[in-house]
Amino acid sequence: MDDPVAMPGNGGPTVQPPESVTWLVHVDRTMWVAGVRGLMLQALHPLAMRGVWQNSNFREDPFGRLRRTADFVGRVTYGSPEEAEAIGRRVRAIHRALRIRDPDTGRTHRVDDPELLLWVHCAEVMSYLEVVRRAGAPITDRQADEYLAEQRRSAMYVGLHADDVPGSVGEMDDYFARMRPVLRVIPESAAAVRFLLWPRLPESMRFLSPAKPVYFPFGALCYYTLPDWARRLYGALPEVPQIAVTAALRAFRLTMNTIPDFVHQQVLDEGTRAMLRASRERLGAAGYDVDKGLRALVDPRRHPGPAPG
């Protein structure tokens, strides 16, 4: 697949400005729940799941995949246009070189097949939007559509064309309705959910081992935020009242959003942390008040220019 055309610039210090709906969604700490939920949802596409299984170390380090996703999302949100284009080129080059063997048909598929890239993108961004809104972030229906339209830009970095990507909640709903007949649980999908419910910590994160017993409730929360139809396909855990899931999600958000940025970022890769530090410096130089970190920039009073009246 050829690389897409150059990304349109926004003239600002970050790919997505603090005024965007993307910023409002992505700085929310319930993105950790949303990220795991997104991986669980993606795993329901047999070919996409086999692509992960055959071409990555997911079985040894499922959390590492989440951190790599967090790095990509961070760079195409808070990074400079140059940083975002660099990671986009790297991701596209990796995908071009990989293949998927389908044991059901005997065929070999490209990882950068546009249909697979589109599924991964849609499962991710809808998970981000739905989980963060359900957790209590004040995102209106109009803003939800704006977020998905903004995320067409992120899809371009992995090799998709913006016009081929759903850009509103209605378009996303139609897309998932079309995809439902394709989705099913294969052995790799079931194993992936088990790994995500009780992951093996990578060497760099063994300092978190004493807290591992609390991970299962977190993994279960991620699972229970899946759509009803996805949980029915998996059947991995007994059903619980969804009102309790919403309450737990809101409590998680309330707790996590009180953690200072520098503490929260310790679970990220050093490269991701360096990118975020550079982002903060650029935003400060552009007149944003970054004293309280990037998450605080959801407050318009911290933006340059006259305070809102």
Image: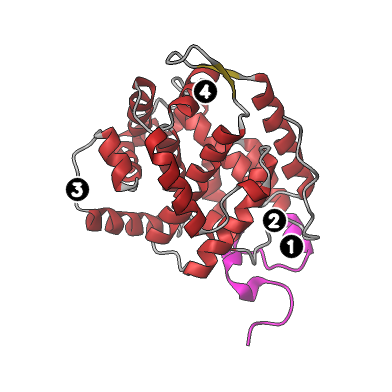
Mark 1 belongs to which amino acid? Gly
Which label sits in the foreground, 2 or 4?
Answer: 4
- Determine the CA span between mark 2 and mark 1: 6 Å
- Residue occupying the point 60% across, 45% down: 73
Mark 1 = which residue? 284
Mark toward the start of the polypeptide (1 vs 3): 3
Give the numbered dot on residue 182: none
Mark 2 belongs to which amino acid? Arg
Q: Position of residue 172 (x, y in %)?
A: 49, 52
**Magenta run includes residue 291:** yes
The quadrant in which residue 283 appears is bottom right
Mark 4 belongs to which amino acid? Gly
Mark 3 = which residue? 240
Mark toward the start of the polypeptide (4 vs 3): 4
Give the numbered dot on residue 51: 4
The quadrant in which residue 60 appears is top left
Q: Secondary structure at mark 3?
A: loop
Q: What is the crowding at mark 4: few (fewer than 14 residues within 10 Å), some, or many (at least 20)?
A: many
Q: In this rendering, is residue 204 above or below 253?
A: above
Give the numbered dot on residue 280: 2
- Determine the CA span between mark 1 and mark 4: 41 Å
Cβ atoms under marks 2 and 1 closer than 8 Å: yes
Which label sits in the foreground, 1 or 4?
Answer: 4
Could you tell me if residue 29 is visible in this image? no
Residue farthest toward the bottom in the current orientation of the protein: 309
Q: Which residues are magenta?
A: 281-309
